[in-house]
Image: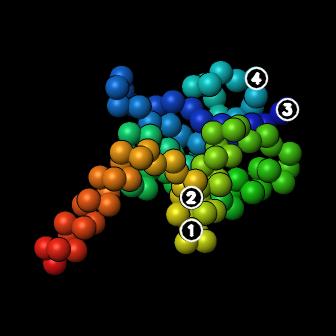
Amino acid sequence: MAVKVRLTRTGANRDISFRVVAADSRSPRDGRFIEILGWYSPRQTGKNFELKLDRIDYWKSVGAIVSPVVQSLLKREKRSAEGKPEHTHQKISKGKKAKLAKAAKAAAAAG
């Protein structure tokens, strides 16, 4: 039996959320699973996921395959645990840079 750590969809229409589960690779996306390992809510702002890292590490140690989306959530969790920002290579357009600089000048002049 090949086990995958992947997302399963929950929630209502237009209010989507996911569970991170360990499941047999042959079972359907929203079908039977072995264990719930966390949750992910893409529409929520701020911290929008939670993972049981010890259980995910266990499943990886016994040969489970981690899906790309769960892998990115793991990377985000590890970055936040180290105290680093989530995105370090954000591209900001010239217009947005000018707006940010103008806002910073106005705040400095006001305060």
The answer to which of marks 4 and 3 sits earlier in the sequence is 3
Circle 2/circle 1 CB separation < 8 Å: yes
In the shown orientation, is residue 109 left or right of residue 77?
A: left
C-alpha separation, residue under disc 1 versus residue under disc 3: 37 Å
C-alpha separation, residue under disc 4 versus residue under disc 3: 8 Å
C-alpha separation, residue under disc 2 versus residue under disc 4: 37 Å
Q: Secondary structure at mark 4?
A: loop
The answer to which of marks 2 and 4 sits earlier in the sequence is 4
User: Could you tell me residue 47's position as x and y percent?
Assistant: 43, 56
| Residue 106: quadrant of the picture | bottom left
Amino acid on which the number 1 mark rests in the picture:
Lys
Q: Residue at x 32, y 57 (%)?
A: 100
Label 3: how many residues lie within 10 Å, few (<14), some (14-19) or many (20+)? few
C-alpha separation, residue under disc 2 versus residue under disc 1: 9 Å
The answer to which of marks 3 and 2 sits earlier in the sequence is 3
Circle 4/circle 3 CB separation < 8 Å: yes
Camera-nearest residue between 108 and 71: 108
Q: Report the disc number at residue 88.
A: 2
Is residue 22 something one can see in this rendering? no
Q: Report the disc number at residue 26.
A: 4
Label 4: how many residues lie within 10 Å, few (<14), some (14-19) or many (20+)? few
Q: Report the disc number at residue 84.
A: 1
Between disc 3 and disc 2, the foreground one is 2
State the residue position of label 3: 1
Amino acid on which the number 4 mark rests in the picture:
Arg
User: Could you tell me residue 22's position as x and y percent?
Assistant: 69, 41
Camera-nearest residue between 94 and 48: 94
C-alpha separation, residue under disc 1 versus residue under disc 4: 37 Å
